[in-house]
Amino acid sequence: MADVTIDIIKNGPLIVKGPVELKDSEGKAYPAQARMALCRCGASTEKPFCDGTHSKIGFQAAERAVPESAEG
């Protein structure tokens, strides 16, 4: 079993559990947490963390990843 898991919440955040280090674009680390909810809707005021705004704005996530939309 993996030490780190990432669960996708339907129309909600990514739930990251386990020993993981999260850094911003400048390499600065956020305080370590055993569980993090990461925003997928882009509307959180606590980015990169989820603040529940997805439910207020009616965020609808794609059901599956779309391979042809991947950055490359």
Image: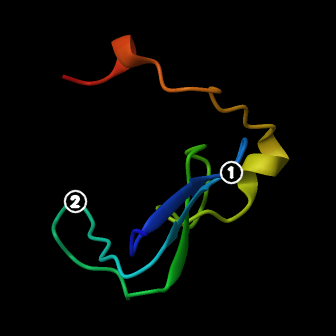
Dot 1 crowding, Cα within 10 Å, few <14, some 14–19, many 20+: few
Residue lying furthest top:
68
Q: Nearer the viewer, mark 2 or mark 1?
A: 1
The residue indicated by pointer 1 is 9
Please, what is the three-letter code of the amino acid marked with disc 1? Answer: Ile
State which quarter of the image contains the N terminus: bottom left
Q: Quadrant of residue 20?
A: bottom left
Q: Residue at x 74, y 60 (%)?
A: 52
Please, what is the three-letter code of the amino acid marked with disc 2? Answer: Ser
Q: Residue at x 22, y 59 (%)?
A: 25
The residue indicated by pointer 2 is 25
Q: Residue at x 68, y 51 (%)?
A: 9
Q: Quadrant of residue 28?
A: bottom left
Position of residue 26 in the picture relative to residue 19 (left or right):
left
Give 32 or 58, whichever is nearer the viewer: 32
The correct choice, above or below, for 60 with respect to 47 in the image is above
The spot of residue 60 in percent (x, y) is 72, 31
Give 19 or 48, whichever is nearer the viewer: 19
Report how far apart the C-alphas of labels 2 and 1 lie in the structure. 24 Å
The spot of residue 55 in percent (x, y) is 81, 49
Q: Secondary structure at mark 1?
A: loop
Position of residue 21 in the picture relative to residue 50 (left or right):
left
Q: Residue at x 16, y 70 (%)?
A: 27
The correct choice, above or below, for 40 with respect to 67 in the image is below
